[in-house]
Amino acid sequence: MMFVGFLGCYGAIQESQCLLGTFFACLVILFACEVAAGIWGFMHKDKISKELITFYDSVYDKSITLTDTEQRQTSAAVLKVFHETLNCCGKGGVLSVATMWMSDTCPKKTSDIFEMIFSMVLCCGIRNSPVY
């Protein structure tokens, strides 16, 4: 990604048709790969879903029984990625009393409205800046 970004930025700065053409070709290839991965994922969504559920369940069950602090932190990091990505917490959305130590892995309630407001204020501030 850094290489592709470099091609685009440096090609724009130098106004090089060769670099910008290479940048465009890389973007087309990346886009085609993303579309192919999306189609493959859609065609195999049931298998992928079952494998992810199996993996999550195994990490979740293993993390409950772990006594080593380092291994527990590693499994908590994996669970945190799942929880934040899927906006869930524990099996069935509920944490049991035995797994309350994992509440750190649950996603925090944040409001996207504030993020959008701050980004719009920043955008308007840059637009109204006399530097540009």
Image (cartoon, grey):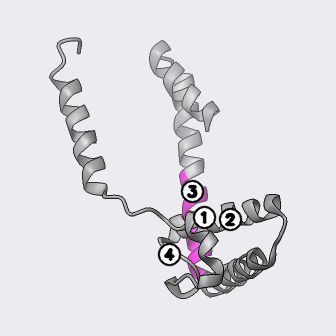
Q: Is residue 34 magenta?
A: yes
Q: Residues within 10 Å of mark 2 (few under 14, many from 20)?
A: many
- Residue 14 numbered tag: none
- Residue 32 numbered tag: 3
**Which contiguous range is marked in magenta?**
31-43
Quadrant holding the C terminus: top left
Q: At label 2, which amino acid type do we have? A: Ala
Q: CA distance from mark 2 to mark 3?
A: 35 Å
SS state under label 4? loop
Q: At 54% across and 47% down in the image, what residue appears?
A: 28
Residue under label 2, please give it: 76
Residue 47, placed above or below residue 41:
below
- Residue 80 numbered tag: 1
Residue 30 position within the rendered picture, expressed as x and y whole percent measured from the top left = 58, 49
Q: CA distance from mark 1 to mark 2?
A: 6 Å
Residue 22, placed above or below residue 86:
above
Residue 2 position within the rendered picture, expressed as x and y whole percent measured from the top left = 62, 33
Q: Main secondary structure of the magenta part?
A: helix
Residue 21 position within the rendered picture, expressed as x and y whole percent measured from the top left = 53, 31
Q: At 46% across and 15% down in the image, what residue appears?
A: 13
